[in-house]
Amino acid sequence: MNHPARLLLAPLFGVALALSSSPAWAAFRVDGKPKVSFFAEGSPGALDIEGKTTDLTLVDDGTTVKAIVKLDTVTTGIDLRDHHMKDKYLHVDQYPEATLTFSRADLQLPTEVGKSTKGELAATFHCHGVDEPVTVTYTIKKSKTGYAVDASFHYNAAAHDIDIPSYLGITVSPEQHARARFNMIDE
């Protein structure tokens, strides 16, 4: 025969066990189809290149958030240029991803639906085997289901040991920038 105290404690123990096995935070993840772009300009202003992808993953451990882009998915609209970018300059076989890592605590989220926050945060951009500090500028708008994020940062491709393309007197500037627009949910 079961003791009444045991009958009361059994459900409480189950709830406590379930709470202790789930994370204390809700992890961010991308929802829908993101738009990620890498921009390079040629000098003397004769060439603008935009590499685009919809491949963006967020890894959130509750303390640090890492945004990951698989570089072999980036396209510029010209097949030969894509081939050179991936094989000759980015070496995607050796360095398949670019990542942006930042502290979750530095991200200021709006608390009311329809409201936005704007800010900057320190991050580390990892590309071509090199980590460099960057400053990310962002706007985040809260929706009923999550957040609309628009974030960008500048980086120097030469600081990442990426050769700078030059062709017929036009040289791509090493000063480049990235932008990501996506919906994020907090699970």
Image (cartoon, rainbow, N blue to C red):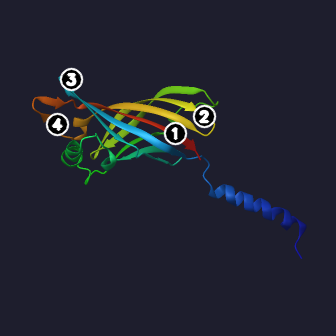
- Looking at the image, is mark 3 or mark 2 earlier in the sequence? 3
Q: Which residue is mark 3?
A: 45
Determine the residue positioned at 32% across, 36% down.
Answer: 38
The kind of residue tagged 2 is: Ser
Instruction: Answer whether labels 4 and 1 touch (C-beta < 8 Å).
Output: no
Query: Gap between marks 3 and 4, in whole Å?
Result: 14 Å
SS at circle 3: loop
Instruction: Answer whether labels 1 and 2 touch (C-beta < 8 Å).
Output: yes
Quadrant for the N terminus in the image: bottom right
SS at circle 4: loop
State whether residue 11 is above or below residue 139.
below
Determine the residue positioned at 87% across, 65% down.
Answer: 5
Determine the residue positioned at 85% across, 66% down.
Answer: 7
The kind of residue tagged 1 is: Asn
In the picture, measured across the screen, residue 169 lies left or right of residue 128, that is: left
- Looking at the image, is mark 3 or mark 1 earlier in the sequence? 3
Instruction: Answer whether labels 3 and 4 touch (C-beta < 8 Å).
Output: no
Query: Gap between marks 4 and 1, in whole Å?
Result: 33 Å
In the picture, measured across the screen, residue 169 lies left or right of residue 113, that is: left
- Looking at the image, is mark 4 or mark 2 earlier in the sequence? 2
Q: Which residue is mark 4?
A: 165
Q: Residue furthest bottom?
A: 1
Query: Gap between marks 3 and 2, in whole Å?
Result: 39 Å
Q: Which residue is mark 1?
A: 183
Q: Which mark is residue 39?
A: none
- Looking at the image, is mark 3 or mark 4 earlier in the sequence? 3
The kind of residue tagged 4 is: Pro
Q: Which residue is mark 2?
A: 143
